[in-house]
Image (cartoon, rainbow, N blue to C red):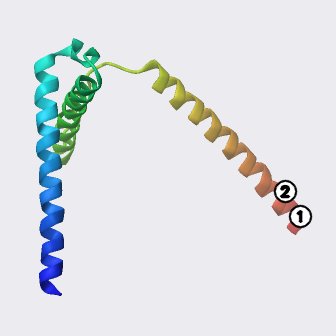
C-alpha cells in the first residue's frame, strides 16, 4: 500500500511539475511577443494571458511582502472606474440593509412588548 501511495504522489508531483514548466514557457513566449502578441491566434492569446497573469502575480507578491514588513504596498495610482462604481453600489446596498435591519429590530421590540 505504501508503494501505491508513494507512486500516486510521485505522479501528482510530476503532473504539477510539467504544468509548471508549461506555464513558465507560456509566460516566456508571452513576454517575448510583447503587448501586440495576443492577437496571433489561440496559442498566442494563452501565452499573452499567461504573461499578464504572471506580471500581476509579481505585483501581488510584492504587495504581500510589503504588508508583511508593515509597510503600505505601493499604489500605482490607476483606479478602475467600474470597480469604483461597484464599490459605491455595494456601499449603498449595505446602507439599505442596515436600515432594513434597524427597522426589523424596532418591529421585533414593539411586538415583544
Left or right of 42: which side holds 93? right
Q: Give residue 90's position: percent from left, percent from top.
A: 57, 35
Q: Residues within 10 Å of mark 2 (few under 14, many from 20)?
A: few
- Name the one closer to the observer, 60 or 21: 21
- Name the one closer to the observer, 11 or 100: 11
Q: Give residue 88's position: percent from left, percent from top.
A: 55, 28
Name above or below for residue 109 compared with residue 28: below
Residue ID for mark 1: 111
Q: Secondary structure at mark 2?
A: helix
Residue pushed farthest top? 36
Residue pushed farthest bottom? 1
Q: Which labelled disc corresponds to residue 107?
A: 2
Quarter of the image where one finds residue 92: top right
Q: Are marks 1 and 2 in contact (CB under 8 Å)?
A: yes
Q: Give residue 75's position: percent from left, percent from top.
A: 26, 26
Tell me the quarter of the image containing the N terminus.
bottom left
At 16% from the left and 16% from the top, the residue drawn is 34
- Name the one closer to the observer, 14 or 60: 14
Q: Give residue 14's position: percent from left, percent from top.
A: 12, 59
Left or right of 72: which side holds 113? right
At 27% from the left and 24% from the top, the residue drawn is 45
Distance between mark 1 and mark 2 Cα atoms: 6 Å
Left or right of 51: which side holds 95? right
Q: Which labelled disc corresponds to residue 98?
A: none
At 28% from the left and 15% from the top, the residue drawn is 39
Quarter of the image where one finds residue 62: top left
Q: Secondary structure at mark 1?
A: helix
Amino acid at each position: 500500500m505504501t508503494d501505491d501511495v508513494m507512486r500516486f504522489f510521485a505522479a501528482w508531483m510530476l503532473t504539477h511539475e510539467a504544468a509548471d514548466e508549461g506555464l513558465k514557457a507560456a509566460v516566456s513566449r508571452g513576454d517575448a511577443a510583447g503587448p501586440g502578441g495576443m492577437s496571433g491566434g489561440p496559442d498566442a492569446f494563452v501565452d499573452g494571458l499567461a504573461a499578464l497573469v504572471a506580471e500581476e502575480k509579481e505585483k501581488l507578491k510584492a504587495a504581500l511582502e510589503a504588508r508583511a514588513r508593515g509597510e503600505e504596498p505601493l499604489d500605482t495610482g490607476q483606479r478602475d472606474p467600474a470597480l469604483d462604481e461597484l464599490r459605491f453600489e455595494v456601499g449603498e446596498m449595505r446602507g439599505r440593509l442596515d436600515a432594513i435591519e434597524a427597522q426589523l429590530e424596532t418591529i421585533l421590540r414593539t411586538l415583544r412588548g
